[in-house]
Image (tube, rainbow, N blue to C red):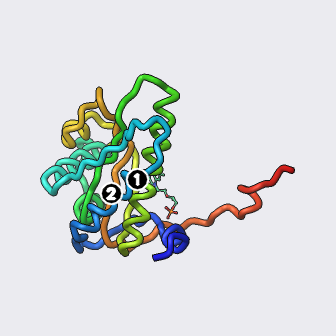
């Protein structure tokens, strides 16, 4: 696939079928991530793949974050279970921790480039994804489940991977609002 086509085709999916993505597609996307630019040569991106047992635990955590002790109706239970268990793969994206605020910002930029590379590689293989953040990605229990040490790495999102069935809808700003020339 042409790079320009992959860039335009890359979209966020909100729902996924249960079809599994071949392992080599995932491995290619991780390799692509690793080619991201990185000013300080810190290569701060890490990807932790979570299996179904861990995803069940995350699903339970999400249910408790959303509903606490309240009972959960069938509709919402299915919605959250589908969200956590349908996508073929779940990668926890994390960034190596640094005290240096300038480096932290540049490292986050590098991680975002890595995730974009990863997503474009998936698009090239006909696979969808979603980068999500929220209460759950910052929750200490998520660090425990993913076995990520919060003193060493910061979770910057979940990367859901699979064959998408429901796309986000978005209208882009027109080019004249984002591009200007100064002579
Ligand atoms: C840092 C980051 C965090 C995101 N977190 C979420 C999220 O929590 N939930 C969600 O639905 N989409 C999330 N997204 C996806 C964006 O909402 C999505 O990219 C945007 O709506 C544009 O849609 P598109 O990716 O199809 O172009 C996130 C994207 C980024 C870059």
Query: Which residue is most to the top?
Result: 99
Residue at x 52% of width, y 74% of height: 5
Mark 2 Cβ inside 8 Å of ligand 1: no
Q: Judge whether 42 appears above or below 12 on screen.
A: above
| Pointer 2 residue | 31
Q: Where residue 146 sits in the image (x, y, percent)?
A: 21, 43
Q: Where residue 172 sits in the image (x, y, percent)?
A: 63, 64
Do tag 1 and tag 2 residues touch (Cβ < 8 Å)?
A: yes
| Pointer 1 residue | 35
Seen in the image, is 101 located left or right of residue 19?
right
Q: CA distance from mark 1 to mark 2?
A: 7 Å
Q: Judge whether 19 appears above or below 130 on screen.
A: below
Q: Judge whether 114 appears above or below 15 on screen.
A: above
Q: Where residue 38 sits in the image (x, y, percent)?
A: 46, 42
Query: Which residue is most to the front?
Result: 41
Label 2 crowding class (10 Å Cα cut-off): few <14, some 14-19, many 20+?
some
- Image quadrant containing the N terminus: bottom left
Q: Looking at the image, can residue 74 be seen?
A: no
């Amino acid at each position: 696939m042409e790079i320009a086509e992959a860039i335009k085709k890359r979209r966020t999916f909100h729902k996924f079928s249960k079809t599994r993505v071949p392992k080599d597609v995932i491995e290619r996307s991780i390799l692509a991530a690793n080619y991201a630019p990185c000013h300080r040569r810190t290569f701060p991106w890490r990807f932790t793949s979570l299996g179904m047992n861990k995803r069940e635990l995350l699903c339970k955590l999400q249910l408790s974050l959303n509903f606490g002790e309240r009972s959960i109706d069938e509709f919402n239970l299915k919605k959250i279970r589908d969200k956590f268990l349908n996508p073929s793969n779940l990668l926890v994206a994390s960034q190596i921790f640094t005290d240096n605020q300038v480096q932290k910002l540049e490292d986050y930029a590098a991680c975002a480039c890595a995730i974009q590379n990863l997503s474009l590689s998936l698009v090239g293989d006909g696979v969808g994804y979603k980068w999500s953040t929220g209460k759950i990605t910052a929750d200490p229990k998520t660090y425990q489940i993913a076995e990520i040490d919060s003193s060493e790495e910061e979770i910057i999102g979940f990367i859901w991977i699979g064959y998408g069935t429901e796309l986000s809808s978005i209208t882009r700003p027109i080019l004249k609002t984002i591009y200007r020339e100064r002579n």
